[in-house]
Amino acid sequence: MAKNFESEITQFLKQYKDQNADTEARQREGRYRLWDKQVDQELQDGYKAARTPQKPYVYYENN
């Protein structure tokens, strides 16, 4: 491939970002809402302690 080759997808994304300047800010906001959260470790420990271990072969019926 040539060094200055750009695929149609890359060209589309560059054009889209030029036309929608707030795209990256909206992406960061969405990431913050879904992934970048503070985790309450005490609450997580409680969830782990209350969990019931799953038996092996859960789809196997013992008759």
Image (tube, helix red, strand yellow):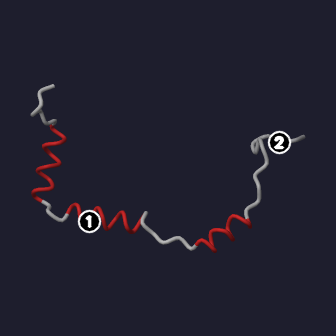
Residue 9 lies, in percent from the top left, at 19, 41
Task: Please name the residue shown 15% across and 38% down the image.
Answer: 8
Q: Is residue 15 left or right of residue 49?
A: left
Image height of 31 relative to 40, above or below: above
Picture residue at 17% right of the left edge, 48% below the top: 13
- With respect to residue 54, does 40 lie above or below? below
Mark 1 or mark 2: which is in front?
1
Q: Is residue 61 above or below residue 52?
A: above
**Camera-side residue of 16 and 46:** 46
What residue sits right under mark 1 in the picture? 26
Residue at (11%, 27%) from the top-left corner?
A: 2
**Residue at horizontal 79 percent and vertical 48 percent from the top:** 55
> What amino acid is found at the position of numbered circle 2 in the picture?
Glu
Q: Which mark is residue 37?
A: none
Which residue is denoted by mark 2 in the rendering? 61
Picture quadrant where residue 24 is located: bottom left
Residue 5 image-quadrant placement: top left
| Earlier sequence position, callout 1 versus callout 2 | 1
